[in-house]
Amino acid sequence: MKLQENGMLRENGMSRDMCIDVARRMNALNARFYRENAASFSQTRRSGWPGWERCLAELKRDEGTCANPTSAVRETACHVLDLACGNLRFARFMADAGLEDVFYLGMDDCPELAADAALPSAWDVSLRRLDIVSALLAGDLQDELGTAIAQAWGGPTTHPAAADLSVAFGFLHHVPTHAARLALLRAMLEVTRTGGICCVSFWKFMSNERLAAKANATTRKALADLGMSEEDLGAGDYLLGWQDVPGAWRYCHSFDDAEVDELLSALEGVALPVARFASDGRSENLNSYVVLRRL
């Protein structure tokens, strides 16, 4: 039995996901999109998101965390892992918030996005190029992160080779398949120290009537352009355009609360959700945020 949900198919009451070959094709599509549209995309992504304010506020509730630079308990530098760091705007947001003595490791597959970015000279900044989705689909992400962290933060230090804060903002919607999205969260938590914080955002563009209509329209056009069918995609998967540029398609997944619930349930015993809230956009609910503490 097949049912319609947000214009996409579901089978037998279970979410239908794309196959691995299509997942790789979607990742290649996104890589091409960002490579060819890095300048125009980055230009529209300069300011921080309102939800980040809440994330830092939640972090400051824990005395001694790296998000509280005035804490007397804080004795070591703050190690921050920023996955899919893009043009480094979250790093700039942290700098504007007054975070000092930061060891920052940003990872992305499109260095063009960060070409003109500047961070405080007092920070220890490491940028690594990594196709995160390819590593996920190959089952190699955890090893890749461990290697990058050891290279960036290794050597004689009293601080363990792990992140105090790991984040992935504006990226989960580019990760195809539920299994890969769960693997990403697990890998992030694995390289976050016990007691450390992991923050992620889940884009919910199909909850907005205007964006949903646009997503359905661009998906139909993109599928025809790419010689694909709706059945190739999973439930909640869409192809979005960019500034009416011909062929500028990118794969995006729209989350709902049930899916976020399922992901969090699979992390029980590994991390404790300390905050979950909606923010961003004119409706102030386009992103769902989760703040996790590593157990």
Image (cartoon, helix red, strand yellow):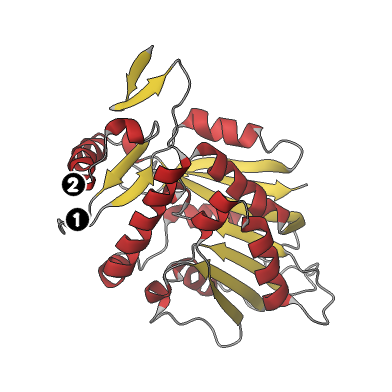
Q: Earlier in the sequence, mark 2 or mark 1?
A: 2
Q: Closer to us: mark 2 or mark 1?
A: 2
Quadrant of res 115: bottom left
Q: Position of residue 81 (x, y in %)?
A: 61, 65
Q: Which residue is mark 2?
A: 225
Task: Name the residue nearer the viewer: 112 or 228.
Answer: 228
Q: Label 2: state its secondary structure.
A: helix
Q: Is residue 201 visible?
A: yes
Q: Which residue is mark 1?
A: 247
Q: Residue at x 63, y 77 (%)?
A: 100
The crowd level at tag 2 (other Cα within 10 Å; few <14, some 14-19, many 20+) is few
Q: Are marks 2 and 1 in contact (CB under 8 Å)?
A: yes
Task: Name the residue nearer the viewer: 62 or 31.
Answer: 31
Q: Label 1: state its secondary structure.
A: loop
* Amino acid type assigned to the residue bearing label 1 in the image: Gly
Q: Is residue 192 left or right of residue 104?
A: right
* Amino acid type assigned to the residue bearing label 2 in the image: Asp
Q: Residue at x 70, y 49 (%)?
A: 293
